[in-house]
Every structure is written in structure tokens, then in C-alpha cells.
Image (tube, rainbow, N blue to C red):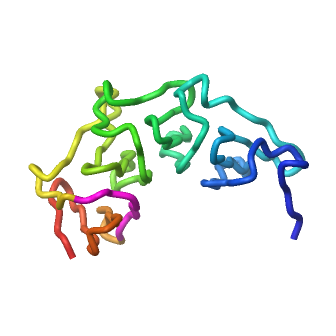
């Protein structure tokens, strides 16, 4: 197993997210080091601090169109576009990213989950008023039925998100 570190070109010692895209390249979200792409031979670094005032990448996702999404503690990045509170995110501190059964990007954050609606270029918010239990939504995973599972910090439950309804377990 080859091992790579800061001496080999990584900008930081802690990797928070790893994603392999359709071309086979690895994308590395760093804790305090931004974003790196690894093609198998060398690293290329991207300055996310300049784009989104954040150098920590928490999660990485590729949508159906092949766009990469990056979740940070200051919002989301898709290609060269940044999304934050003004675009419908309730909290800029994002937890996780997942695609729902219709291929829409969904984001978990503190007290909400949001779904990106490509037609309007905005996020649609789902909160406790929509039936989501009050929780810090940290983990998302697509279910076999095409909905999403939502996991959280501290609430000791998971929630099934099917369509626009939430079912706690």
C-alpha cells in the first residue's frame, strides 16, 4: 500500500473526505487545507478559502450530470459556484451530501435537510415544521426505495425521508 502525506504534496495532514470521480481521479477534502485532486501520480491543489471563506471540505459528491459538489462549514460549492444561506441553506455548516432517488442533491445540516432544485437554482428547505425531528442532521444515505436515511448527532434516532415526509425510527 503506498502512503502519501504532506511531504508528497498534500497541503494538510488530515483528510476529511475522499471521492473517486467518473474519470477515476481521487478528490480529497482537507481539514484546513482545501481541496486536492490526485490523478495517481501527482496532487493538484485548489484554494477553497478564496471561493467560500473555508479551507475545510467535509464531504464530496458527484451528481448525475457529473458535477462535483463539496460541503464545507461555510456552504456548498458546485464547480465554480458557491451556495450559502442566500441560496436557501438554513445553515452554512453542512454535514453530508447525498443523491435522492430522483438524482437531486440533498444536504444535511443543523436542524434541516435541503434539496437542490436545479430548475430554480435554489435549495428547498425541510425543517421541524415539515415533520423532520429536531436534530443535527449529519449523515445521509440513499435507501433501497429511493428515499434517504437521515442520521444525526445526539438525537439517538434515524429518520426515513420518503418523498416529502419524514418517519423517525
Spot occupied by residue 92 in the image (x, y as percentages of width and height): 38, 37
Q: Position of residue 14 (x, y in %)?
A: 69, 54
Give me the residue at 74% from left, 46% from top.
Answer: 12
Q: Nearer the viewer, residue 48 or 130?
A: 48
Is the residue 141 above or below the residue 24 in the image?
A: below
Give the residue at x 50% y 25%.
81
Horizontal side, residue 19 vs residue 84: left or right: right
Is residue 11 in the magenta section?
no
**Which quadrant does the C terminus fall into?**
bottom left
Q: Is residue 168 left or right of residue 103?
A: left
Residue 146 location, quadrant:
bottom left
Q: Is residue 159 above or below residue 42?
A: below
Please name the predominant secondary structure of the magenta segment in the image: strand
Q: Quadrant of residue 91?
A: top left
Q: How many marks?
A: 0
Residue 147, how many percent across, how many down? 29, 62
Position of residue 21 in the picture relative to residue 40 (left or right)? left
Q: Which residues are magenta?
A: 135-143
Q: Is residue 83 above or below residue 73?
A: above
In the displayed structure, does residue 38 sit left or right of residue 131? right
Magenta region includes residue 141: yes
Q: Measuring 51% from the left and 33% from the top, which residue is drawn there?
A: 78
Determine the residue positioned at 39% across, 58% down.
Answer: 138
The quarter of the image holding the N terminus is bottom right
Residue 75, by quadrant, is top left
Amino acid at each position: 500500500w503506498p502512503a502519501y502525506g504532506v511531504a508528497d504534496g498534500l497541503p494538510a495532514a488530515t483528510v476529511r473526505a475522499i471521492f473517486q470521480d467518473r474519470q477515476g481521479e481521487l478528490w480529497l477534502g482537507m481539514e484546513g487545507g482545501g481541496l486536492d485532486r490526485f490523478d495517481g501520480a501527482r496532487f493538484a491543489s485548489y484554494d477553497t478559502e478564496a471561493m467560500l471563506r473555508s479551507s475545510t471540505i467535509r464531504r464530496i459528491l458527484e451528481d448525475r450530470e457529473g458535477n462535483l459538489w463539496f460541503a464545507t462549514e461555510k456552504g456548498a460549492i458546485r464547480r465554480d459556484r458557491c451556495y450559502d444561506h442566500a441560496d436557501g441553506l438554513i445553515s452554512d455548516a453542512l454535514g453530508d451530501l447525498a443523491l435522492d432517488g430522483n438524482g437531486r442533491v440533498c444536504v444535511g445540516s443543523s436542524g434541516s435537510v435541503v434539496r437542490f432544485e436545479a430548475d430554480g437554482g435554489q435549495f428547498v428547505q425541510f425543517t421541524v415544521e415539515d415533520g423532520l425531528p429536531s436534530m443535527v442532521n449529519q449523515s445521509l444515505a440513499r435507501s433501497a426505495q429511493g428515499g434517504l436515511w437521515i442520521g444525526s448527532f445526539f438525537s439517538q434516532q434515524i429518520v426515513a425521508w420518503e418523498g416529502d415526509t419524514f418517519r423517525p425510527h
